[in-house]
Image (cartoon, rainbow, N blue to C red):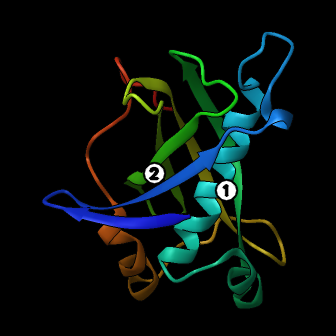
Amino acid sequence: MHAIIEDNQGKLLRMEFPVYTFHIDYSRHVSNLVYVQWMESARCTLLEAAGLPIAKMGEMGFLPVLTETQIRYHSPLYLGDTARLEAWVSEFRGASAWVEYRITRPDGALAAHGRQKGLFVRADNLRPYRFPPEQRALFEPFIRTEECGDEPAPRG
């Protein structure tokens, strides 16, 4: 399930993920790999919500490629919990973008925060693809200045 939330800073994607037995690791809480999978689900859904799903990008001759993933874990999620994930674009340059993620527990406590840098490349030669103004405009409602967590992740 997902929803697009709009406030005075713009739009963000909100998704919920129930925690199932296959999400649990040896320590009896959600595996760190699952958080990254949830981030990937949110990134794909955010692209769809902006009007450029990955399959459509491929048909148009360009693709999104992740170049960096950062995540910080704060408090665990357990079997039976429902994780709430919020995602938005914090920075959009000509051929790259940063997507921010905030994952909270059912009690509202921060479970994790992360960010991913994506580079858009031409499908035929993998060189950077720069968005024309009409395509960039699709992402502008999702660009927010806030960053996740207790301290900003390093930029690079």
Which is nearer the eye, 80 or 126?
80
Which is nearer the eye, 102 or 104?
104
Per the rendering, the mark at residue 60 is none
Instruction: Tell me what residue is drawn at x 45 percent, y 51 percent.
Output: 87
**What is the quadrant of residue 53 in the picture?**
bottom right
In the image: residue 5, left or right of residue 135? left
Q: Secondary structure at mark 1?
A: helix
Compare marks 1 and 2 and give the one earlier in the sequence.
1
Extreme residue toward the front, this view? 80
Marks 1,2: beta carbons within 8 A = no
Tell me the quadrant of the picture where the N terminus can be found: bottom right
Relative vertical location of residue 136 with respect to residue 80 in this rendering, above or below: below
- The amino acid on which the numbered mark 2 sits, given as a three-letter code, is Ala
Extreme residue toward the top, this view? 27
- The amino acid on which the numbered mark 1 sits, given as a three-letter code, is Ser
In the image: residue 114, left or right of residue 150? right
Instruction: Tell me what residue is drawn at x 54 percent, y 51 percent.
Output: 16
Residue tagged 2: 87
In the image: residue 13, left or right of residue 24? left
Instruction: Tell me what residue is drawn at x 76 percent, y 25 percent.
Output: 31
Instruction: Tell me what residue is drawn at x 71 percent, y 26 percent.
Output: 30
Mark 1 packing: few (<14 Cα in 10 Å), some, or many (20+)? few
Q: Position of residue 57 (x, y in %)?
A: 68, 81
Q: Give the Cα distance between marks 1 and 2.
A: 10 Å
Mark 2 packing: few (<14 Cα in 10 Å), some, or many (20+)? many
Extreme residue toward the left, this view? 8
Residue tagged 1: 41
**What is the quadrant of residue 152 in the picture?**
top left
Q: Position of residue 107 (x, y in %)?
A: 39, 28
